[in-house]
Structure formats: structure tokens, C-alpha cells
Image: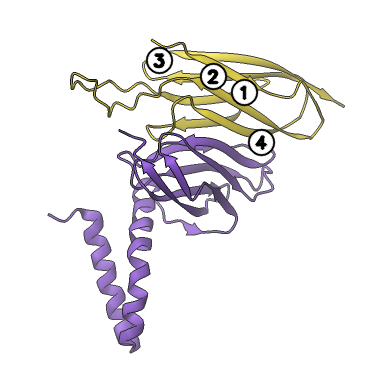
């Protein structure tokens, strides 16, 4: 199976109350379960079906993803800087595998 | 056999025709009918998938390229005008691709901590179609926007 590699870009330091962008991507084929292999057999569905972003433990953004999301799902969204801490990212795959990543965030008073 | 959704659309068209006919404008009726056909199917779909009807709103912005070579990776940026406070924010935005084999593409759940309700991503489109974004606000209202995208290559094969 291809390597599943999550990547996230956040600014290292932001001002308090600043709205900043978080860009995330995970390399993943997002197999829809609708395709056939060359032998005519249905390729089983395997999607990243959920993405969750936590800011100091609280869920601040979540995406439920279905067959219509492109391969290597890319999500860019905004967050408002509250206090310094950690951003945790989790991608859940069909079958239960979870891929995670953490980024520190420094908020200037 | 006519699928349920088209039958409902046909019924609605019948009702419309009657209503407009009573209003007395034969010509008006015919020219107005061309539009409600698509709109009725669309609102029916939203009602089926989300449970309630949505209204087209200028507060929802769905930005997609009008034409894109391949349907495998069509960029989209979606934003909703909202103060994103505890009292008034966007709860979730549903992205629907009505002409895809599986219509719901994603749901994006926002919180006041987002500061603004904006999401950029990429979707698959099986054919040219009007993609829908339906935003569920914290007061329960459903606001919708659509964006027509022409694709040359089926992104779901």
C-alpha cells in the first residue's frame, strides 16, 4: 500500500485573536469502492472518512468526507488564535486506522 | 418506472402549471416552467438528504472553476458570511454533487473558534453539474449556494 503521509502548515507564531489559516493534506488514494481492477474485480472502498482538528484538546474543526472527495484530500481552514498550545490533527481511514500529527502554536499576547 | 424524485418534480410542475394557468398567462406559464424544473429537483434533493428545504442565499459563497479539464481534482473554496460567535455561527456546510454516483461529497463542521467559516478543498465530479453548498446556521436556518462546473473527464471512473 502507498505511504500515507499527513502534512500540515501553520504559522509558528500568531497574534492573539488573529485569524490564521491551517493547511492540511494527506497522501491517500481515497479509493471509492466504485472502481474495478484490470481483472474486473471491484476494488474495495478505502477512504479517509474523517478529519478532526483539536486546539488544546477541544475539537475546533471537523470534516466528514465521502467518495466525492479527491485523492490526497486537502483541507485549508481558519482558526482564531486564543492561547499558546498545541494543534492536533487526526485522519481516520475506513477500517479504523488513524493517522495523526501535532503542531505547536505560539500566541503573542 | 419513474423514480420517486422525478415523479414529485412532475407533480410540482403540474401544480405550477395549474397555478400559473389560473393566473391567466399561458405564455408566461410556459416560459416560467423551464426554470422551476431544475430548481424543484434540486430542492427535493436537499430536502431528502438534509431533511429540510434550503434557501439560496448571497451569504454563502461557493467558488469553483466554471470549466475544469478533469473531474478528479476540482478545486473549491467555500465561505459563509457569519460573525462566528457563540450566538451566531455556521454549524456545518454540506457539499452535494447531484450528478455524482454518491451525492454527498463532504460535511464541514465549524465552531466559533474558526473565526471565519472558510474551507478550501478539492472534489471529484463525475460529470458537468451544479455543485451545491448548504450551510446550516446556529439558528437552524439552511442557506444554499450553487456553482456550475463543466468537466471533460469523469472523475469517478
Label 2 – label 1 distance at C-alpha? 9 Å
Q: How crowded is mark 3: few (under 14 residues within 10 Å), some or many (20 or more)?
A: few
> Cα distance, mark 2 to mark 3?
12 Å
| Pointer 2 with pointer 1, Cβ within 8 A | yes
Which quarter of the rendered picture does the C terminus of chain B lie within?
A: top left
Q: What element carries label 1?
A: strand
Read off the residue under disc 4: B114
Q: In which quarter of the image is residue A89?
A: top right
Q: Where is residue A53 in the image (x, y as percent from the top left)?
A: 59, 25
Q: Is residue B9 left or right of residue B108?
A: left
Q: In the rendering, at what x and y percent does residue A19 appear?
A: 74, 36
Chain of the residue on which disc 1 is drawn: A
Residue for badge 2: A90
- Picture disc at residue A96: 3
> Label 4, label 3: how many angstroms apart (C-alpha)?
27 Å
Q: Which chain is purple?
A: B
Name the outermost residue toward the left.
B1
Is the residue marked by circle 4 packed among few (<14), some (14-19), or many (20+) residues within 10 Å?
Answer: many
- Look at 29% across and 84% down and name the residue there: B21
Q: Distance between the residues labelled 3 and 1?
A: 19 Å
Same chain, labels 3 and 1: yes
Amino acid at each position: 500500500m502507498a505511504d500515507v503521509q499527513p502534512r500540515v502548515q501553520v504559522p509558528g507564531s500568531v497574534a492573539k485573536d488573529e485569524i490564521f489559516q491551517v493547511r492540511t493534506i494527506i497522501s491517500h488514494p481515497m479509493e471509492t469502492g466504485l472502481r474495478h481492477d484490470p481483472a474486473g474485480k471491484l476494488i474495495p472502498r478505502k477512504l479517509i472518512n474523517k478529519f478532526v482538528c483539536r486546539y488544546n484538546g477541544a475539537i475546533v474543526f471537523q470534516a466528514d468526507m465521502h467518495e466525492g472527495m479527491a485523492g490526497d484530500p486537502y483541507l485549508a481552514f481558519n482558526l482564531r488564535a486564543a492561547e499558546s498550545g498545541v494543534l492536533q490533527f487526526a485522519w481516520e481511514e475506513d477500517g479504523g486506522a488513524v493517522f495523526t500529527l501535532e503542531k505547536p502554536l505560539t500566541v503573542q499576547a | 418506472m419513474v423514480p420517486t424524485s422525478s415523479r414529485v418534480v412532475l407533480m410540482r410542475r403540474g401544480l405550477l402549471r395549474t397555478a400559473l394557468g389560473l393566473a391567466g398567462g399561458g405564455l408566461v406559464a410556459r416560459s416560467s416552467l423551464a426554470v422551476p424544473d431544475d430548481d424543484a429537483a434540486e430542492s427535493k434533493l436537499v430536502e431528502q438528504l438534509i431533511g429540510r428545504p434550503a434557501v439560496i442565499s448571497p451569504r454563502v459563497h461557493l467558488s469553483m472553476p466554471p470549466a475544469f479539464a478533469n473531474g478528479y481534482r476540482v478545486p473549491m473554496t467555500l465561505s459563509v458570511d457569519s460573525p462566528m460567535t457563540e450566538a451566531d455561527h455556521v454549524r456545518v456546510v454540506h457539499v452535494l454533487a447531484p450528478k455524482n454516483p454518491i451525492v454527498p461529497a463532504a460535511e464541514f463542521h465549524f465552531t466559533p473558534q474558526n473565526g471565519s467559516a472558510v474551507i478550501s478543498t478539492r472534489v471529484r465530479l463525475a460529470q458537468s453539474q451544479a455543485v451545491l453548498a448548504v450551510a446550516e446556521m446556529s439558528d437552524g436556518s439552511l442557506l444554499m449556494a450553487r456553482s456550475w462546473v463543466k468537466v471533460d473527464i469523469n472523475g469517478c471512473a
